[in-house]
């Protein structure tokens, strides 16, 4: 039995996972149109390579990656491009961004797909490029371009690959479903990933509230010697990769660093399947399993959805009672954001759409004064002092915030969950982080402006000095000539007189030229 | 005389204090000379906090003259582009009380950049000469255009333009610049009686474009 | 009706609020108050009821003066806790004006002058107590004889003492700590058998059981996770260590025994109800340990070498001063900030 450790703090919110019947994948009918944002990942937006009016087939690339930290977008089904414009995107702000709209023709015609049978012998760079071209980003919720995670060549190398099937947030059962139904594919994907990064061990991590998934994964992992299934007690937020690494290895990822710094790579089970599909079947990322749940839905469940499906259609298919719900949440109830425009589409990182009733998740209570009870510090998995961060965030004291490690906050929400005064702590930290980020950008900008301004001042002074020098030189030359009695005008007159005098005895033949 | 001082307690105390004052004064004077720092680094530190817009709204011809004035003792609340954050940072640096922005010098507004409407530009170079950071590209009788990444939003180019073809547009809109504002909290506002009636609110963060 | 736009997390721990915490603290004082009432009569209970009503009045007035809503904050019960803690600390048959001054200072000066709930740097009940102790030393030392030593006053006596102090004719007596201070010349063991009041099993009749009752309440609060063990453990631990070091086999000039110090005066009450006030104490657990230890050391020193018989109030206020300093140096090790040795 492998030894496991514990994280600091953590909470035990009610799980409510049975609502969505984990373990069954429900298929959805083709929607009428899909809206695909060009940014469904962390990094530079993809650039559309189609135009309005073009016909596209399923699996066809419709936006290409821009730069190294970017990921392309593919059409999930066949149809016609009907718009490329700003639309509401799944983002906490509710603001808009460039989206490509495809009106589906219903035939679901696909391009020809070709997989790599001999992936074991191909060079790593080729495999990485294949994954990049397949549009794969982290499907656990962060959306980091997977190709970059796999491509890094660190000195110490990666020794362990962790497939993160923890899924610690309440309500969500997408990973649970995927592990129960596609365990073999996950293990295949894990094998590919481990081969690519040179990992010697694979850990398939599952919380102990998912016994069926544990069983399925254990069976599938028997075939692969280096893979082990490890279970551990259920606690939120064990699924955060930093916390998971602490649970499995009692090691901490250095502040400001990434797990690769200590030789570990984490991937979501759905991402592993996407990698497998891309390499073995040549299939790009065009759909995912999403948990659609909440008591305002008559038919909750885990559904295979095409990327770009508007949330409104997803909810309608689940028989959503709009009047019963006060909010719709994209993601889980602890870290997901509230959706205001139901036409927002589902994207690569949408692991859950939650529609609770008013009694299920009551409206937030009004905020009271902080009584400094310290329960937030008890709950924080990063051992921060949320209380102090709260006071400094209110005072906008950026220096003290950084000294108290605000940037190590993973925004899990455990502190706000336990606060007796119902203070929305995470909002304070997000606001402070945003202010710090913007202030840093402004500093770079103003430093640049100052350099430019000083350069300009210098240039103007140089030009003025050059003009001054020229004028002074002319003046000096004139004075020097005047001093030495060398008057050019007088000299010219004398010359003319001399010539005239020289010509007179000769007669009138020639005039002075 | 020493006798009288030693026996009279008042004179003794006086002499002791005067003696200590002389000794410590000499020490301080020595330290002031021996450890003096060249130049005036304070004005450099102040200048690095100011936003470098070079707009002149503070009444000085640029940020460095204002920085030097502050080092001499001028008030810190004259910079509208810097806004409350700059006032706070200056207050922390100089260990003085932060004051609200002096409305005589302007109000805190959204950061902007200049934009030349190219259809109307006549190529006169008057704006190019006015720009304090050389952010306008162009030459005589050639098209002028503003390099957005270099423009500080000082709007010194707007006035010289004879055809009035320059607009100031907001710089920070859109999804990349959005972040959560601080929560509304009535238990926090109006903490003390003097807050009442002032427009202290808890809202902060950039203005967000409507969804 | 449009969809709500609020920040995550969307879930919240059910049934937790400031009111909940305060109610549990009040519940935990019941055993102690009951024992006090048994041994010393209903004086404390009457004071608590009177004081709580006064406190609510003062708080509503203060909130009104500050231009804020004065009805809903009262629901959080925090001022009732302040009043209860102060009244437990006061002598049971104090006159009404003593309580008015005490509660007034606690609520208006100790709490609202600094900004209300959550903003006070000092423990409000202790602020009121110390003001009274220094201003009215006579009334503040008017403790009575416990049951078993003398007659315990009844309810009518209590009300008379409160509202018509001039006509109240009570008998005052010294507490065990008073006696300990006054008879420093005696050997400790002799002292413990000399006076009737000290004849209790551990540290004086009535007082030891009062302390045990507050200890029981405190342990219940610990189990309810209202606070962590660090501050009480720090205080009791430091006090025990000091008493152990200072107890030279009970000579006439030494300190009291460990049990004596732990179970007399306001030790347990202070350890579980005063220093655990979260607003005025340190923030981190390590900080709270140090905070408690500081109070423990000060309590011992002032009891043995200082001018007052009991020292919890002074100890707490002095450590309240030091709390921000303690916070500065006891920040927990944040995830990922420990320097790791690279071993290959």
Image: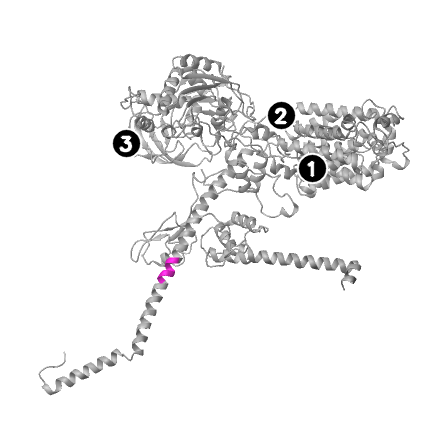
Q: Main secondary structure of the magenta part?
A: helix
Label 2 marks a residue whose chain is C
- The Cα–Cα distance between marks 3 and 1, rounded to whole angstroms, is 74 Å
Residue A118: within the magenta? no
Residue located at (32% from left, 33% from top):
A64
Residue A54 disc label: 3
| x and y percentages locating residue A122 in the rendered image | 29, 23
Question: Quarter of the image containing the C terminus of chain C?
Answer: top left
- Badge 1 marks a residue whose secondary structure is helix
Foreground mark, 1 or 2, reads: 1
- The Cα–Cα distance between marks 1 and 2, rounded to whole angstroms, is 32 Å
Give yes or no for contact between labels 3 and 2 (Cβ–Cβ under 8 Å). no
Residue A460: within the magenta? yes
Badge 2 crowding class, 10 Å Cα cut-off, few under 14, some 14 to 19, many 20 or more, is few
Label 3 marks a residue whose chain is A
* Residue C41 can be seen in this image: no
Tell me where the magenta segment starts and ends, as one range: A458-463
| x and y percentages locating residue B93 in the rendered image | 55, 49
Vertical side of C211 occupied by A389: above or below: below
Q: Which residue is mark 1?
A: C319
Residue C15 disc label: 2
Give yes or no for contact between labels 3 and 1 (Cβ–Cβ under 8 Å). no
Label 1 marks a residue whose chain is C
Q: Nearer the viewer, residue A403 or A109?
A: A403
A348 left or right of C22 in image: left
- Badge 2 marks a residue whose secondary structure is loop
Badge 3 crowding class, 10 Å Cα cut-off, few under 14, some 14 to 19, many 20 or more, is few
Foreground mark, 3 or 2, reads: 2
- The Cα–Cα distance between marks 3 and 2, rounded to whole angstroms, is 57 Å
Residue B29 disc label: none
| x and y percentages locating residue B71 in the rendered image | 53, 56
| x and y percentages locating residue A511 in the rendered image | 12, 81
């Amino acid at each position: 039995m492998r030894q496991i450790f514990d994280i600091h703090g953590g909470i035990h919110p009610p799980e409510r996972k049975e609502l969505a019947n984990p373990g069954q994948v429900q298929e959805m009918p083709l929607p009428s149109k899909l809206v695909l944002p060009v940014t469904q990942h962390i990094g530079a937006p993809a650039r559309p390579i189609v135009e309005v009016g073009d016909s596209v087939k399923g699996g066809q690339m419709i936006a290409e990656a821009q730069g190294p930290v970017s990921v392309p977008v593919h059409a999930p089904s066949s149809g016609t491009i009907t718009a490329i414009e700003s639309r509401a995107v799944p983002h906490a702000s509710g603001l808009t961004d460039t989206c490509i709209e495809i009106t589906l023709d219903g035939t679901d015609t696909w391009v020809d797909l070709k997989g790599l049978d001999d992936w074991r012998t191909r060079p790593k760079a080729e495999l990485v490029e294949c994954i990049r071209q397949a549009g794969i980003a982290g499907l656990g919720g962060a959306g980091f371009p997977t190709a970059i995670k796999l491509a890094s060549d660190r000195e110490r190398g990666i020794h362990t690959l962790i497939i993160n099937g923890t899924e610690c947030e309440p309500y969500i059962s997408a990973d649970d479903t995927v592990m129960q139904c596609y365990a073999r594919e996950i293990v295949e994907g894990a094998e590919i990933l481990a081969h690519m990064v040179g990992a010697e061990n694979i850990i398939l991590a599952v919380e102990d509230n998912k016994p069926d998934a544990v069983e399925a994964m254990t069976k599938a992992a028997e075939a692969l010697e280096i893979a082990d299934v490890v279970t551990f007690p259920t606690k939120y937020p064990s699924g955060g990769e930093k916390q998971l690494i602490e649970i499995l290895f009692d090691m901490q990822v250095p502040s400001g660093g990434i797990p690769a710094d200590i030789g570990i790579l984490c991937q979501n089970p759905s991402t592993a399947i996407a990698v497998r599909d891309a390499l073995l079947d040549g299939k790009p990322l065009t759909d995912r399993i999403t948990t659609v749940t909440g008591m305002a839905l008559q038919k909750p469940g885990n559904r295979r959805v095409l990327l770009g499906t508007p949330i409104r259609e997803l909810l309608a298919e689940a028989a959503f009672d709009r009047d019963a719900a006060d909010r719709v949440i994209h993601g889980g109830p602890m870290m997901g954001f509230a959706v205001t425009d139901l036409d927002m589409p589902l994207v690569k990182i949408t692991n859950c759409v939650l529609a609770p009733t008013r009694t299920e998740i009551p409206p937030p209570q009004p905020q009271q004064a902080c009584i400094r009870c310290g329960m937030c510090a008890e709950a924080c998995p990063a051992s921060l002092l949320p209380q102090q961060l709260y006071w400094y965030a209110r005072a906008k004291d950026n220096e003290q915030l950084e000294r108290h490690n605000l940037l190590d906050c993973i925004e899990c929400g455990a502190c706000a969950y336990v606060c007796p005064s119902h203070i929305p702590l995470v909002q304070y930290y997000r606001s402070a982080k945003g202010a710090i980020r913007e202030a840093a950008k402004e500093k770079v900008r103003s430093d640049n402006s100052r350099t430019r301004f000083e350069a300009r001042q210098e240039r103007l002074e140089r030009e003025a000095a050059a003009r001054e020098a020229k004028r002074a030189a002319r003046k000096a030359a004139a004075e020097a000539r005047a001093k030495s009695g060398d008057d050019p005008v007088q000299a010219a007159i004398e010359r003319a007189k001399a010539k005239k005098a020289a010509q007179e005895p000769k007669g009138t033949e020639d005039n002075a030229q | 005389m020493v006798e009288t001082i030693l026996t009279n307690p008042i004179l003794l105390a006086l002499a002791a204090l005067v003696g200590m004052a002389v000794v410590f004064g000499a020490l301080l004077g020595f330290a002031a000379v021996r450890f003096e720092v060249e130049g005036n680094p304070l004005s450099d530190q102040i200048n690095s906090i100011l936003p470098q817009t070079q707009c002149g709204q503070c009444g000085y011809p640029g940020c460095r003259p204002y920085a030097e004035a502050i080092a001499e003792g001028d008030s810190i609340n004259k910079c509208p582009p810097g806004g409350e954050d700059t006032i706070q940072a200056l207050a922390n640096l100089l260990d003085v009380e932060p004051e609200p922005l002096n409305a005589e010098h302007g109000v805190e507004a959204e950061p902007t950049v200049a934009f030349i409407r190219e259809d109307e530009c006549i190529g006169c170079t008057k704006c190019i000469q006015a720009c304090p950071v050389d952010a306008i590209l162009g030459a005589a009788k050639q098209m002028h255009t503003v390099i957005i990444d270099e423009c500080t939003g000082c709007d010194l180019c707007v006035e010289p333009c004879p055809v009035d073809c320059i607009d100031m547009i907001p710089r920070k809109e859109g999804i990349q610049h959005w972040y959560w504002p601080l929560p509304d909290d009535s238990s926090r506002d109006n903490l003390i009686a003097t807050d009442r009636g002032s427009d202290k609110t808890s809202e902060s963060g950039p203005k967000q474009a409507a969804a | 009706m449009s969809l709500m736009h609020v920040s995550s997390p969307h879930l919240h721990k059910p049934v937790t609020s400031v009111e909940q915490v305060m109610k549990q603290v009040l519940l935990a004082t019941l055993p102690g108050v009951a024992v006090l009432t048994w041994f010393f009569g209903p004086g404390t209970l009457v004071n608590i009821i009177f004081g709580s009503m006064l406190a609510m009045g003062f708080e509503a007035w203060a909130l009104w003066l500050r231009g804020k809503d004065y009805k809903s904050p009262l629901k959080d019960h925090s001022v009732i806790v302040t009043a209860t803690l102060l009244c437990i600390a006061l002598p049971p048959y104090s006159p009404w004006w003593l309580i008015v001054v005490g509660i007034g200072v606690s609520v208006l000066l100790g709490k609202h002058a600094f900004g209300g709930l959550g903003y006070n740097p000092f423990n409000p009940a202790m602020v009121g107590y110390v003001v009274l102790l220094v201003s009215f030393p006579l009334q503040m030392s008017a403790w009575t004889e416990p049951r078993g030593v003398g007659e315990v006053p009844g309810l009518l006596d209590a009300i008379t003492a409160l509202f018509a102090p001039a006509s109240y004719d009570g008998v005052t007596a010294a507490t065990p700590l008073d006696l300990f201070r006054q008879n420093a010349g005696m050997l400790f063991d002799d002292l413990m058998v000399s006076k009737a009041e000290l004849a209790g099993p551990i540290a004086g009749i009535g007082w030891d059981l009062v302390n045990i009752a507050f200890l029981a309440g405190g342990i219940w609060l610990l189990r309810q996770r209202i606070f962590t063990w660090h501050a009480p453990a720090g205080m009791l631990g430091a006090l025990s260590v000091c008493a152990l070091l200072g107890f030279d086999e009970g000579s006439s000039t030494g300190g009291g025994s460990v049990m004596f110090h732990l179970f007399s005066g306001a030790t347990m009450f202070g350890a579980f109800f005063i220093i655990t006030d979260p607003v005025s104490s340190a923030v981190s657990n390590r900080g709270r340990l140090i905070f408690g230890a500081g109070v423990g050391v000060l309590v011992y020193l002032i009891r043995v070498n200082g001018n007052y018989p009991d020292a919890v109030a002074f100890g707490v206020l002095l450590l309240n001063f030091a709390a921000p300093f303690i916070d500065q140096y006891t920040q927990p090790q944040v995830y990922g900030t420990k320097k790791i040795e690279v071993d290959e």
